Image (cartoon, helix red, strand yellow):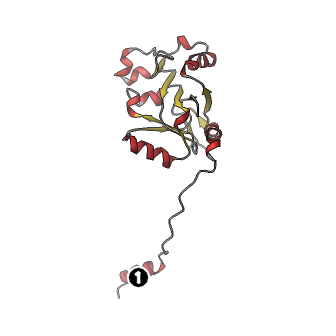
């Protein structure tokens, strides 16, 4: 037997045995606590939650948060609530978004286990809007809150929604000296506005 065969035989004999697949993950919060669970995880990743009865409450909420809202550069997928102030060029040239203050975007599913909100690719002219804005506001319906990513993906598959982005809170990184920095590579803040009844 050659030394090559001896080494390969030793490797095969030393290989670890198989392991059982882990049990399916189940959420740690009952359905009644989904909103509390979502808010806890959203705060943990640097975001904020506002619960609104209707989308008409959005403009007063944002005006209170940013008193100079009318003077800011804003993109909105919900112009009836808050109008877009971007120039037409911004929809064809991403360089025009370099001074975008606020992106207000409608989301679909949101997930309690990790505070992620699904934004379909077709909801915005291009994905740069989601990452170049200084501040991001995500609008979701309260009845779109799901316990786990498993259920969110199942609903997306049922709807045939195959392209989009899960967003959880503002931009964050801890690459340098393991020090968490918010907003280094994208939005400095993320406000999730949950609208309607459970």
Residue 59 coordinates in the image, percent (x, y)? 56, 17
Q: Quadrant of the N terminus?
A: bottom left
Point out the image quarter for the C terminus. Answer: top right
Frontmost residue, 163 versus 52: 52
Which residue of the protein is positioned furthest toward the bottom in this rendering?
Answer: 1
Judging depth in this view, the residue of 131 and 144 nearest the camera is 144
Which residue appears at 49% of the width and 75% of the height?
A: 17
**In this image, 160 relative to 147: left or right?**
left
Q: Residue 22: x and y, percent?
A: 53, 63
Mark 1 Cα shell of 10 Å, populated few (<14), some (14-19), many (≥20): few
- Element assignment for label 1: helix
On the image, the x and y values in percent for residue 139 come to: 52, 28
Visible residue check, residue 60: yes
Q: Quadrant of residue 147?
A: top right
Q: Is residue 73 left or right of residue 176?
A: left
**Residue at (37% x, 15% y) in the render:** 88
Q: Nearer the viewer, residue 149 or 65?
A: 149
Query: How far across and how far down the image is residue 91, in percent?
Result: 37, 21
**As drawn, 80 above or below 33:** above
Q: Residue furthest front?
A: 197
Question: Does residue 98 appear anywhere in the picture?
Answer: no
Q: How many marks?
A: 1
Which residue is denoted by mark 1 in the rendering? 9
Direction from residue 142 to residue 125 in the image, left or right: left
Which residue lies at the image location 44% right of the left edge and 47% below the top edge?
154
């Amino acid at each position: 037997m050659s030394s090559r065969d001896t080494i390969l035989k030793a490797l095969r004999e030393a290989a670890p045995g198989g392991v059982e697949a882990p049990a399916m993950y189940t959420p740690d919060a009952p359905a009644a606590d989904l909103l509390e669970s979502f808010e806890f995880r959203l705060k943990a990743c640097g975001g904020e939650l506002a619960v609104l009865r209707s989308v008409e409450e959005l403009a007063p909420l944002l005006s209170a948060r940013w008193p100079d809202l009318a003077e800011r550069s804003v993109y909105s997928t919900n112009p009836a609530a808050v109008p877009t102030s971007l120039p037409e060029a911004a929809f064809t040239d991403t360089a025009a978004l370099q001074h975008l203050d606020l992106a207000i975007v409608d989301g679909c599913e949101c997930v309690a286990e990790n505070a992620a909100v699904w934004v379909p690719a077709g909801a915005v002219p291009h994905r740069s809007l989601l990452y170049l804005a200084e501040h991001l506001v995500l609008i979701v319906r309260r009845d779109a809150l799901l316990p786990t990513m498993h259920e969110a993906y199942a609903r997306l598959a049922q709807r045939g929604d195959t392209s989009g982005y899960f967003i959880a809170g503002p931009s964050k990184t801890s690459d340098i000296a393991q020090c968490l920095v918010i907003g280094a590579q994208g939005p400095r803040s993320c406000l999730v506005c949950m609208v309607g009844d459970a």
